[in-house]
Amino acid sequence: MMEQYHRIKREHPDRILLYRMGDFYETFYEDAVTASRVLGITLTTRGKSEGEPVPLAGVPHHSVNTYIHRLLRAGHSVAICEQMEDPALAKGVVERAVTEVITPGTVAIEEFLPADEASYCLALQPGATGRLGYALGDIASGELIAGEDAATLALGLPARFRVRELIHPEGLEEAPWLRELRALYPELHLTPRRAWDFLASEAESALCRHFGVGRSELLGFRPGEEAIQRAAGALLAYFHELKRSELAHVDRIQFLRAETAMVLDRVTVENLELLRPLRGEDPAATLFGQLNRCRTRMGARLLARWLLAPLLDAGAIEARLDAVAELIDQAALRRELGELLGRAADLERLVGRLGGGQARARDLKALADTLALLPAIRGALDGRASALLAGLAAEIAPLAALGARLAAGLVAEPPARTTEGGVIADGFDPELDRLRALTRDGRQWILDLQEQERARSGIAKLKVGYNRVFGYYLEVGRSQGDKVPADFTLKQTLTDSLRYSTPALKSREEEILSADERRLRREQELFEALRAEAFAEHLALQANARALASLDVLAALAECAERGCFCRPEILGEPRLEIRGGRHPVVEALLAGGGEFIPNDLSLDPEREQIHLLTGPNMGGKSTFLRQTALIVVLAHVGSFVPAAAARVGLTDKIFTRVGASDNLARGQSTFLIEMEETAAILRGLGERSLVLMDEIGRGTSTYDGLSLAWAVLEYLHGPAAGPGLRPRTLFATHYHELTRLEGELPRLRNYHVTVKEWQETVVFLRRVEPGPAERSYGIHVARLAGLPAEVIRRAFQLLHWIEQDQTMARPAPAPGERRAQLELFADGRQAVLRSLAALDLESLTPLEALNALHQLQAQLREASGGAR
């Protein structure tokens, strides 16, 4: 047996080998030491190897999935080695083989997958200079996405999608893009693969073999997309190697191309909080969390994909908008669809389990119940005006024959496990019914025997029992041993009881056990036949899954639009953006019941108002305004209504954001360096239809450095330095008020500000965006709201007046004893004015300088006097 183990282990040296032995999966040697540490199970020994005890650790087979999940979360891969024959019938060592390998990116166990998000494995292949071909595969659903991007964008894929594992050609461990990936995503499981799997010829062979075509062009690959093809072929080869199955549920490739889907880089996806919040774990703080009113898991996952890849085809966008509009108008239809979809199974993943031979009886029952819903769903969509709704109805195939077959074959409530029977309904198979009758008759005979032997022996507590080692037996207490009839044969002696057999029991035992064994075998055969029948329809089932998921998302978008008073956006061919009464859908929802969201207007036009320079205080709403603009554009391209009174949205190929501050000390990167890297990526990736949102460029360095950088970036965005005819629509928020003078110098730049109202030595944030520059930033007022000590606030105002007026004058000294009573500070403030006056060189002052000095002294005196005139 150990020779067999070593032979199998040599094929999987870097994986934890779970080796099936009866009711346990065992691990040996280093695997056992690792499993014991990670899983918290007992490490023991068994036998010796080269004179040393062999480490051993095992887990029960019925709970193995829990342990596999824990190993995967710890970053290990697992090879499942099963017994391939019945141990009772085996001659010599039981034949064993690895039936599946599970890695962090290829998990298909339903209970360990996120319900509302796909779980991807990513393959990357270097292409043309600075570009990477990629393929994303979700083994649980069969989804396969492929594309090519600049390396800076491709490296954002793990953040945009839920990537658990990355495969790459071996020998590239020190490539700059791979080093960057390791630094960006330290939790990502990296798997080097044989370089020849990524060769063009091998990749094409893998693709053609899997999809049954003669050449890869038939799958949708275009000339020049060799890197994409190599990544996709290598990923499929990896899946086949691990799963040891045909993977027929991976039935198509979806291509993400720049002309079909909006580009959203990692920073933008994170800053806009499309799927995950920047802080905390509250899903309601994300756009996905607010939109996800889907009734099915496959619908929720599709919604996430739509948000990550908004459409660029105006016709496809309008088709979705038509469908959403009809579902808004038809509330009764929406409620009916919601009720039906709420009872549907996750067909997408169920088909994956069918293909992997992992579908259980409850899965088949859920499939039967879902197929029974399809005629009603199609009927509800009959006669719909929307072409998309009508098309989805046409894609739904009820598969009535399969549904009837499953409904007839399965019990109403199947057990969790099929190995103990009770799955197939009575009357479905005559042979199974006969074997069940024999089993029932035999068990009844056993019960009758118990009563007969109690009466014959006079032992009232005599009972019939069974275990797998000794079979059926008659058990009596030790104190009753003298009453046992002469034909009882002792089988086992226990501390408190004795176990016997009789000739009649022995002869009937074989018949009962034989019938029971044949019953279980027949039931398993019938179940596997039903599972195969279901999988034979996997293409139609996947089409149903796609149709139901799309319908679910459209209904969810309609519900959100109705509840949130969203409007239908007008999609424009030219890159303009006009929003009236725009709102941030997430902030508004989180404010519900606790405040009012202030809507704002916006008009961006590359010909007249290409850039809005936005000034105003922190907490005034600048960042919210920037983000809501981007979210409205994303939603419009998804095909959703938008949170606004009216919106005209020009097709936008890319959205770039530079919002918020962060650092990465582990990579030796400061906040300012990251800010500059993100800014550089934006300026390099600009397109004619880009939307750029930049907040506080240059704040991480000295005032003059930061101002100069922000100024230069604004000029670049305005052009022509950005490129011939390149005029990206831009919202540029800043605290550098010096930039507001550019409105007169850059013809397509306009000043806007968020409004505040000063009241009782504080400010009230009105959060309205209006034309013109802000008067000042009100930073000290915000600091007061944050709770800085009063003496710090007073000193800050004092210095602010000195800096704003004339720094050639003596800097006002901090008043001694500022932490004492208010009256002392008042007196010291006047003394500071006197000291400033005494320091003036009257003989050298010009009349203008004297007036300026007098103005400053008066301002200092008013400040020291609490603002009194």
Image: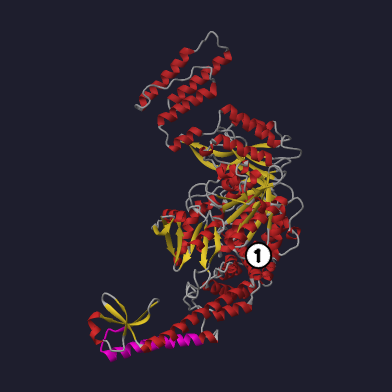
The residue under label 1 is which amino acid type? Answer: Glu
Q: Is residue 506 left or right of residue 189?
A: left
Q: Which residue is mark 1?
A: 326
Measuring 32% from the left and 91% from the top, which residue is drawn there? 452
The segment highlighted magenta reads: 434-463
Query: Compared with residue 683, is residue 24 higher up or lower down, i.e. above or below?
Result: below
Q: Work out whether residue 1 can be spotted.
A: yes
Is disc 1 surrounded by few (<14), some (14 to 19) or many (20+) residues within 10 Å? many
Main secondary structure found in the magenta portion: helix
Measuring 63% from the left and 45% from the top, which residue is drawn there? 172
Q: Is residue 331 left or right of residue 83?
A: right
Residue at the extreme front:
51
Q: In the rendered view, how is the structure colored? A: secondary structure
- In the image, residue 671 lies at what x, y percent? 54, 36
- In the image, residue 433 lies at what x, y percent? 51, 86
In front: 142, or 680?
142
